[in-house]
Image (tube, helix red, strand yellow):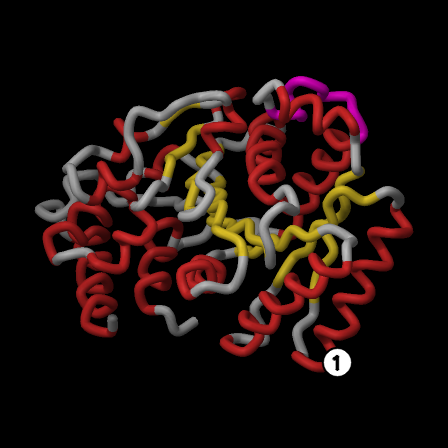
Amino acid sequence: MNDQANKLREIVNKVNNDNIICPIETLKTSAKVITVTSGKGGVGKTNITVNLGITLSKLGYRVVIIDADLGLANIDVVFGTMPRYTLVDVIKNGKNVMDVLCTGPKNVKFISGGSGVEELTRLSQLELENFVRNIALLDKIADVILIDTGAGISENVIRFVMAADDVVLITTPEPTAITDAYALIKAVGTRNRNKTIKLIINRTETAIEAQTAMQKLNTVSQKFLKVKLQFLGYVTNDVMVSKAVKQQKPFSLLFPDCMASKNLTEIAKKIMKTLPTAKSQEGIRGFFNKFFNGNQ
């Protein structure tokens, strides 16, 4: 992996400086990369990711979502769109990333990961060059790139979390979900206790329940891990969310005035407000540099 990381760093430098490797103009701005993750499945992570993307688009940001959930890749299900190509086609079949991009509601772009997430750790030199050249194009078309990871604390999930500019952790107030969220926080804190983790409590009945869950997680994280969490907000356990899921439509689109949609609008504004004013200088290229290095 260290050899691969060194190769990637060399290629990233060439992407920045050498038109032979990357025949696109030097990128002056880069997208903010936000990883959305969870300690366990079933807490609504993907649904939040999709609706967060749509909400950010409504607020005027250009959004790309990368579905990096190897086990349950289902961004396309929530969007009700079946992609023709996946990340595998960029890695293995020579497809341009622009050809692989699908367009969802409100002009949100997305890429289905499929088995491509696993393939990322086994790239040859040529495949690595092609991938970095292709993925760098996303910095030209996006202000925000949301990466929907798998659930849990697998090596790939932790790599996605550690490489991102921002990390958003989704959990619910249930004790098992809180326990699993803590396990993920511990895995991150072990590698870098200064990594900021932002928390969203999903499917909460009341604001008090959400605050209690947040305080519980924050207290144990600070006491035992020396990791401080930031509370982004909560999303109400709204019946309209279930109705939208059954119709394979994002709830923020189908029911824009429901409480869950309003909650997510406030969260989206808070996320963008807490990000640095200047765009990341590393963007998606820097993200994958860190992903392969694995030592953040």
Instruction: Say which amino acid is labelled 1.
Output: Lys
Q: Is residue 231 left or right of residue 208?
A: left
| Residue at the image position 58 percent from the left and 76 percent from the top | 193
The image shows residue 166, relative to residue 95, as above or below, that is below
| Residue at the image position 31 percent from the left and 45 percent from the top | 115
Q: Look at the image and give the residue range highlighted in magenta.
A: 250-259
In what element is the residue under mark 1?
helix
Find residue 128 and report its horizontal and vertical position in percent.
18, 53
Find residue 15 and report its horizontal and vertical position in percent.
20, 51
| Residue at the image position 60 percent from the left and 73 percent from the top | 186
Along the viewing direction, whichever of 239 and 169 lies nearer the viewer: 239
Residue ID for mark 1: 223
> Residue 257, located in which quarter of the rendered image?
top right
Q: Quadrant of the N terminus?
A: bottom left
Counting the numbered discs, the total is: 1
Along the viewing direction, whichever of 243 and 11 lies nearer the viewer: 243
> Residue 139, located in which quarter of the rendered image?
top left
Find residue 132 and report its horizontal and vertical position in percent.
24, 49
Q: Quadrant of the C terminus?
A: bottom left
Q: Is residue 116 left or right of residue 281?
A: left
Q: Is residue 19 magenta?
A: no
Q: Is residue 76 left or right of residue 254?
A: left
Along the viewing direction, whichever of 22 and 86 lies nearer the viewer: 86
| Residue at the image position 48 percent from the left and 51 percent from the top | 150
Find residue 220 and report its horizontal and vertical position in percent.
75, 74
